[in-house]
Amino acid sequence: MSMIIRTQALRAAARNVARPQQQVRALHVENTVDHVLPTSVRNKAWFATKFVVYAATGFGLPFFSVWYHNKKAANGGVF
């Protein structure tokens, strides 16, 4: 089979391959003021409390883990 015939056959085969259609996104976001977060921020004190708890947990967990394992090792495995 010559190179020209082969490439033409491959191009024809590639055109006949069924391509999946792009799916429509199921998310609709209204880009308006105070609606850019996926949570309500109307009660600022409650939002601040939730954010501080979330941030403190994420930041403090490695330190707590180190403290716990050091304490466990110091007591000979009994905690």
Image (tube, rainbow, N blue to C red):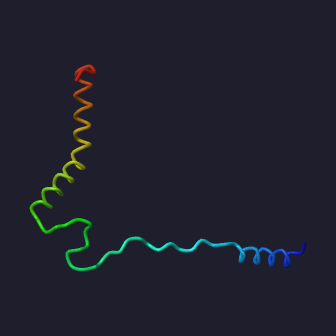
* Residue 3 appears left or right of 36: right
Q: Position of residue 48 (x, y in %)?
A: 13, 60
Q: Position of residue 57 (x, y in %)?
A: 21, 48
Against 47, residue 71 (above or below) is above
Q: Residue at x 19, y 67 (%)?
A: 40
Q: Which quarter of the figure is the N terminus placed in?
A: bottom right
Q: Could you tell me how many numbered marks the image carries?
A: 0
Q: Nearer the viewer, residue 42 or 63?
A: 42
* Residue 1 appears left or right of 48: right
* Residue 25 appears left or right of 43: right
Q: Residue at x 11, y 65 (%)?
A: 44
Q: Which quarter of the figure is the C terminus placed in?
A: top left
Q: Nearer the viewer, residue 51 or 18?
A: 18
Q: Position of residue 70 (x, y in %)?
A: 25, 30
Answer with the quarter of the image where residue 4 lies.
bottom right
Q: Nearer the viewer, residue 50 or 29?
A: 29
Q: Residue at x 28, y 79 (%)?
A: 31
Answer with the quarter of the image where residue 45 lies.
bottom left
Against 18, residue 72 (above or below) is above
Q: Nearer the viewer, residue 51 or 61?
A: 51
- Residue at the extreme right: 1
- Residue at the extreme left: 45
Q: Position of residue 66 (x, y in %)?
A: 26, 36
